[in-house]
Image (cartoon, rainbow, N blue to C red):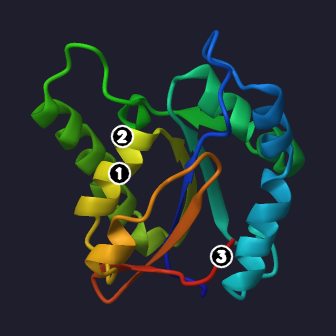
Amino acid sequence: MSGKSILILLRHAARDMSDDGLSETGLKQADTLPGRILKAFSHLGLTSPDSVSLKIKSSPKARTRATLRTLSKELSISIEVDSRLDERNPGERVDVFEKRVESFLEEAALRVPTGETWVACSHLDWLEHASLVIPSDENDFERSEPWPPMTIRIYIFENGIWQRAKGKI
């Protein structure tokens, strides 16, 4: 897998509806993330996150940063906040939101020569749009699969498109 870029898209853990943080369930879900990411690396034939140039990226929302906190601590990698990963903001035009999502995906594709791996945590609306526009080998059914909290999808950039890694992570 060396020399190929990997994009791991993740929906944040279950949120606390009274604020922007995580619920008790969400905190427990977030604690499972390091193990799930290690499983994903094993699924891809990689020995560990140390074997690639790994970046952890988050929307500015507290719930996405909280979802990534345990992973960040365990791997000693700081979380990079990227406003392009934010959910659609009130008053934001749909076309502006869509361009923001597409800009993030285009930058991920540009990282291919570096062989970087990104773990990107975002929101339902962002991930749904990304699923529809990411140039991948997925069929329409796969593209429209739901994104419950803590859903992980892995894409590997090969032959000019993102190819979705199959199997449950």
Residue at position x 54%, y 22% in the image: 61
Distance of label 1 from label 2 (alpha carbons): 5 Å
Q: In the shown orientation, is residue 115 left or right of residue 137?
A: right
Residue type of the residue flagged with mark 2: Asp
The tag on residue 128 is: 1
When the figure is inspected, residue 31 is found, relative to residue 112, above or below; the finding is above
Tag shown at residue 60: none
Mark 3 in CB contact with mark 1 (< 8 angstroms) = no
Residue that badge 2 annotates? 125
Q: CA distance from mark 3 to mark 2?
A: 22 Å
The secondary structure type at the circle numbered 1 is helix
Where disc 2 sits, the SS reads helix
Residue toward you, 115 or 126: 126
Q: What residue is drawn where x is 62% and y is 21%?
A: 62
Vertical relation: 71 (above or below) 169: above
* Mark 3 or 2, nearer chain start: 2
Task: Say whether marks 1 and 2 touch (CB < 8 Å).
Answer: yes
* Quadrant including the N terminus: bottom right
Amino acid, disc 3 = Lys
Residue 168, numbered circle: 3
- Tell me which amino acid carries mark 1: Glu
Give the percent coordinates (x, y) of residue 134. 29, 64
Quarter of the image for residue 85 reads top left
Residue 87 screen position, x and y as percent = 39, 30
> Residue 97 at x, y = what percent?
22, 33
Which residue sits at x=51%, y=24%? 60
Is residue 51 in view from this perspective?
no
Crowd band around label 1 with a 10 angstrom C-alpha radius: few (<14), some (14–19), many (20+): some
